[in-house]
C-alpha cells in the first residue's frame, strides 16, 4: 500500500493523513502550488502526509525534532501540519497571517487537559483555518478508518463474486 500511495495509485490510505486530505476537500483548501510544512516525520502521519500532499502538487518541506530554526520554515508556509506530540510547539509568531494550520497532535498536560501541538488560543485570530484539539482531526481519522473498512469489504465482495 505504501508503494501504491506514493505512486498515486488506488490504495488503502493511513487514516489520519487521509482524514486531513478529506478535510482540505471539504473546506475547499487548495493544495496545488502551496508551500506546506509538515512537522513530524512518523511512518503513520508525517511521511504519508507528505506523499499525499506531493501527489496533489503541493511543495512540501518535512521538519522533525532535529530541524534547526523551525520558525524559518513555518513562517513562509501557506499550510502547516503538525504531528510531533509536543504541547504548544507551534506559536503565533511562527506562522504568517492567513496560514492554514492542521494540528494532529494530542497531548495530556499534568492538569489532565488535552491540548494540541499548536497554541490554539494564540493562533486562532491569525489563521484562516485552524483545527482544534480535541474534535478536529480525530473524528476525521475515525471516519477514514470506517471508509477503509467499507472499501475492504467491497473489494472482498467483488473477489467472492468472481
Image (spheres, rainbow, N blue to C red):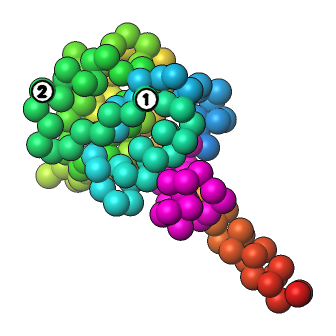
Residue highlighted by disc 1: 59
> How many angstroms separate mark 1 from mark 2 (CA)?
19 Å
Q: Residue furthest right?
A: 161
Who's the residue at 65% across and 71% down the image?
A: 149
Q: Is residue 143 left or right of residue 151?
A: left
* Tags 1 and 2 touching, CB below 8 Å: no
Q: Nearer the viewer, residue 44 or 104?
A: 44
Specify whether residue 151 is in view: yes
Question: As drawn, is 94 to the left or to the right of 77?
Answer: left
Among the 4 quarters of the image, the one containing residue 131: top left
Q: Which residues are magenta?
A: 1-21
Q: Nearer the viewer, residue 138 or 153?
A: 153
Q: Residue 65 falls in which quadrant of the image?
A: top left
Relative to 71, 140 lies left or right? right
Say which residue label 2 marks: 69
Residue found at the far top of this picture: 97
12 part of magenta stretch = yes
Q: Looking at the picture, does residue 3 appear above or below residue 70?
A: below
Image spot of residue 106 (x, y percent): 32, 50
Q: Pick the quarter of the image with the C terminus.
A: bottom right
Residue 67 % position (x, y):
15, 37
For discs 1 and 2, the disc positioned in front in the rendered view: 1
Residue 35 x, y percent position in the rendering:
41, 24
Precedes in sequence: disc 1 or disc 2: 1
Q: Secondary structure at mark 2?
A: loop
Residue at left offset 48%, top offset 23%: 34
Q: Residue at x 33, y 13 (%)?
A: 96
Against 109, residue 103 (above or below) is above
Amino acid at each position: 500500500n505504501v508503494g501504491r500511495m506514493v505512486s498515486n495509485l488506488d490504495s488503502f490510505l493511513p487514516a489520519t493523513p487521509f482524514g486531513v486530505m478529506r478535510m482540505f476537500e471539504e473546506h475547499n483548501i487548495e493544495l496545488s502550488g502551496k508551500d506546506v510544512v509538515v512537522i513530524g516525520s512518523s511512518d503513520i502521519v508525517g511521511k504519508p502526509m507528505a506523499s499525499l500532499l506531493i501527489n496533489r502538487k503541493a511543495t512540501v518541506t518535512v521538519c522533525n525534532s532535529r530541524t534547526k530554526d523551525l520558525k524559518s520554515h513555518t513562517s513562509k508556509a501557506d499550510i502547516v501540519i503538525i504531528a510531533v506530540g509536543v504541547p504548544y510547539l507551534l506559536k503565533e509568531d511562527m506562522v504568517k497571517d492567513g496560514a492554514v494550520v492542521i494540528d494532529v497532535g494530542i497531548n495530556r498536560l499534568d492538569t489532565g487537559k488535552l491540548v494540541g501541538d499548536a497554541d490554539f488560543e494564540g493562533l486562532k485570530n491569525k489563521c484562516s483555518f485552524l483545527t482544534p484539539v480535541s474534535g478536529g482531526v480525530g473524528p476525521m481519522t475515525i471516519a477514514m478508518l470506517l471508509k477503509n473498512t467499507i472499501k475492504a469489504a467491497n473489494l472482498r465482495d467483488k473477489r467472492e463474486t468472481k
